[in-house]
Amino acid sequence: MAGRITLLSGGVGGAKLALGLYTVSAPEELTVIANGGDDLELFNLRICPDSDILAYTLAGQVNEPGGWGIRDDSFHALERVRQLGGTGWFNLGDTDLGLHLFRSELLRQGVGLAEVTRRIAEKLGLKCRLLPMCEQPVSTRLATEEGQLQLQEYLVKRRAEPVLHSVHFDGIEQATPAPGVPEALAEAAMIVIAPSNPLISIAPILAVPDMRRMIREARGLKVAVSPIVGGKSLKGPSDKMLAELGYAVSPVTVAELYRDFLDVFVVDEQDAACMEEVEGMGLRCVAAPTVMKDLACKQALAAALLALL
Ligand code: FO1
C-alpha cells in the first residue's frame, strides 16, 4: 500500500497518468484535482472539460483516440444548433450534454461545484476522489496576436495557431481551494504533478490563492512528470506556447516552474542529458519511460512514481 496519492491534472495528457495510477494503486487512495481554467459557459451551461475528461477516462467511457468526450456519442443537438446558425465550434455530444445539464442545474440550485463533481464521479462509478481546483469560476484568457481569446476559443476554434503574448487567469484572485483540496494535499504521501501543459493546465491550479503554499508545506513527496519529451510536447501545444512566451522548450524549464515546491522531477529516458541541470537546481531527477501510448505504459509510469515512495 503506497498511501494516499494526490494528482494535479489537466485534461487528456494528465488523464493518462490518472488512469495509470487508478489501475495500479488502490483507487480509493487516489485524489485527482482537476484544472478549472479551461471551464466555459456555452448555452448557459457550465462545461468543465478537464474534470469531465478525467471522469470519462477513469470511468472507461472516454472517446479514443482524441481522449475527450464520450465514446460513440452522437451530435444531433449540436447539428441542430449549427443548422440554426448558433455556436457550433465546441463539439458537445448528446450524452455529454446531459452531464452539462445536470451540473448546471445543480449549480443554479446553489450546490457547490465540489459536491456536484462528487455526485458525477459517484454515478459514473469512480472509486477515487475527483475534485475541482476551486468552486469559483476561473477562466484562462490568452493575449494573442489576434487579441484576447478564451482558452477553448484558442485551442479548439483557432487550433492554437495565433501567436501567444501572455496568459491570464480571470477570477483567480477570488478563488479559494475547493472543499477537500487542503486535506487531499495535507494527507497525501505523494503529490504528483501530471505531465499536463504547465502554462494552461497546471499553472491555474497553482495560481489558486494558498495552493502553492499548501503544496510546499505538505509532508508528502512532491513529484512532477515532464510534459516535454525530446524537445516536443507529449500532447497539445505546450512546446509552441512555451517558445512563444520566451521559454526554452525543455524539461529544465518545466522543473524551474515547479522548483519552489518540488522534490523529484521525472524526465523521459530520451532526455537523460537534462538530468544534471535539473539536479543542479537542488532537485532529485529520475529518468523513466513517460510516453503513455497504451495502458501498459500508463501503468508502468504510475508504478515508477509509486516506487519513489
Ligand atoms: N477538443 C477539441 O479539440 N475540439 C472540441 O470540439 C472539443 C470539445 C470538447 C467538449 C467537451 C470536453 O469535455 C472537451 C472537449 N475538447 C475538445 C477537449 C478540450 O478542449 C481540451 O482538450 C481540454 O480542455 C484541454 O485539457
Image (cartoon, rainbow, N blue to C red):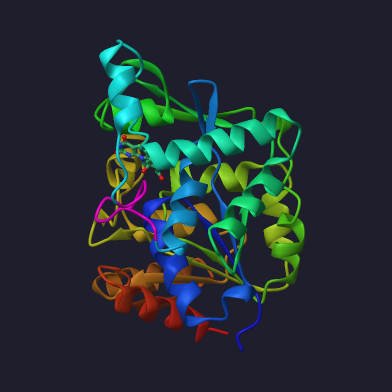
Q: Establish if 263 lies above or below 115.
A: below
Q: Where does residue 105 sit, x and y in percent of width and height?
A: 64, 31
Give the prevailing secondary structure in the magenta stretch: loop
Question: Which residue is pictured at 27% across the width and 56% down the height?
Answer: 64
Whether residue 138 is visible to the viewer of this picture, yes or no, is yes
| Quarter of the view holding residue 65 | bottom left
> In the shown orientation, is residue 20 left or right of residue 116?
left
Q: Nearer the viewer, residue 104 or 282?
A: 104
- In magenta segment, residue 65: yes
Q: Establish if 226 lies above or below 213.
A: below
- Quadrant assignment for the N terminus: bottom right
> In the shown orientation, is residue 96 left or right of residue 162?
right
Question: Which residue is pictured at 60% across the width and 67% down the height?
Answer: 128
Total labels: the figure holds 0
- In magenta segment, residue 43: no
- The residue segment tinted magenta is 61-71
Question: Which residue is pictured at 54% across the width and 33% down the height?
Answer: 101
Q: Nearer the viewer, residue 10 or 197?
A: 10
Q: Where does residue 100 sit, x and y in percent of width and height?
A: 52, 36
| Quarter of the view holding residue 273 | bottom left
